[in-house]
Image (cartoon, rainbow, N blue to C red):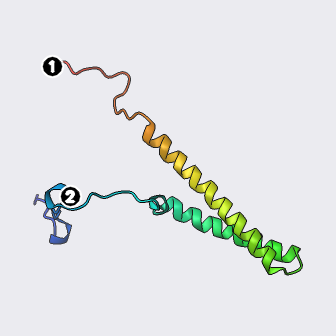
Amino acid sequence: MTPLVLRHEFQPTGVYLDSATYGLPPLRAGRWQAFRTVEAMVAVITAVLAGSTIGLLTVVASEHSLAAALVAGGVVAIAALAAMMRLQESAWERATSAPVSFDSDETGPVEG
């Protein structure tokens, strides 16, 4: 049986930068970091769809008033986005504050 040989493009490159060694500024999470996640993209799209739906319903209900549709759609979109982002932040807080343990209750020290 022949050993597995990796092609060049599948071999690890081993290029890792240490910010302290090279004098690079450390990576920092900015104010908008929460919006750079998949959950936030889904929240923005959902909020826009909810706002546009309410705007369309408002146009139909208010005899084609553009101002009422824009105000109602904007308020609903902003409220939906704020609610979903708050839910995401609370999920992150719960996840980071939970104790992490990979030991089960029945395991003890290994006796040799």
**Left or right: where does residue 16 sit relative to residue 59?**
left
Which label is found at residue 12?
A: none
Percent position of residue 38, x then y: 48, 62
In the rendered image, which residue does mark 2 sit on?
A: 19
Q: Which comes before the other along the chain, label 1 or label 2?
A: 2
Q: Are marks 1 and 2 in contact (CB under 8 Å)?
A: no
Q: Is residue 63 above or below residue 3?
A: below
* Residue appearing at x 29%, y 20% in the figure: 108
Label 1 and label 2: CA atoms lie apart by 42 Å
Quadrant location of the N terminus?
bottom left
Percent position of residue 12, x then y: 17, 62
Q: Residue furthest top?
A: 111
Percent position of residue 62, x then y: 88, 75
Q: Is residue 4 above or below residue 69?
A: above
In the rendered image, which quarter is residue 53 located in? bottom right
**Left or right: where does residue 75 sit relative to residue 61?**
left
In the rendered image, which residue does mark 1 sit on?
A: 112
In the rendered image, which quarter is residue 73 located in? bottom right
